[in-house]
Amino acid sequence: MLNKKGYSLIELLVGLAIIGLIFGLSLSFYKNNNKNNFIDEDAYLLKTNIIKIENMTYSGQSNTKFSENNNYGIYFNINNNTNKYFLYKDLNLDNHYSANEVFETVETNNSVINSLYSGSSMDLLFKSNGDIFLNGIKTSLTNINISLMYNNVIKSVYLNSLTKTINIQ
């Protein structure tokens, strides 16, 4: 009878194969879960910036670089699959975005602005009287949808123009 001390080569290879399989499965789960984390983070960043713009508009807060009106907005442009959007103050009171009115450029971590109501750009302006303008026109839409996409995962941020609530789906 042999006195066995240790493991055979086959036992070691089977053990390594099991460890490799567990590692491979956990890595694929991590990558898939990470996609969702990235887009969730970007959707919450967008929601936070919409709330920031609303608060600046309705609180009467004024940025010292600009005049005393309190109409603030967010401008989205998806012409180049961009991951940037712009926070601006409507300096000339024309209810439209202009490049010289930007006070903050927001860059998402990974997501791109995917779909907007009016094609390739959207200008969402909050006026101090409570009105919301979409591309320069007072909106009659109840729900305004802004979609973000990252690796074929889509998250939508919905703004209800009547109740001023913001939801992420």
Image (tube, rainbow, N blue to C red):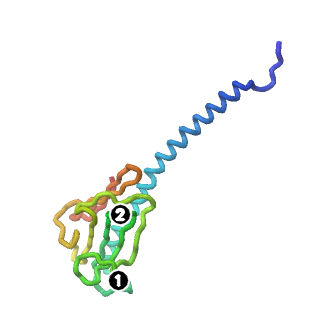
Residue drawn at 18 percent across, 71 percent down: 137
In the image, which is nearer the foreground, mark 2 or mark 1?
A: 2
Q: Residues within 10 Å of mark 1 (few under 14, many from 20)?
A: some
The tag on residue 8 is none
Q: Which residue is mark 1?
A: 62
Residue drawn at 32 percent across, 66 percent down: 77
The quadrant of the picture occupied by the N terminus is top right
Q: Position of residue 80 (x, y in %)?
A: 35, 63
Amino acid type of the residue that numbered disc 2 sits on in the rendered structure: Asn
Question: Seen in the image, is 142 located left or right of residue 83?
Answer: left
Q: Which residue is mark 2?
A: 80
Q: Residue furthest top?
A: 1
Residue drawn at 29 percent across, 58 percent down: 115
Tell me, yes or no, whether the two marked residues, 2 and 1, touch with CB atoms within 8 Å.
no
**Position of 58 relative to 36 (above/below):** below
| Residue nearest the viewer, comparing 92 with 40 | 92
Q: Residue furthest front?
A: 80
Q: Residues within 10 Å of mark 2 (few under 14, many from 20)?
A: few
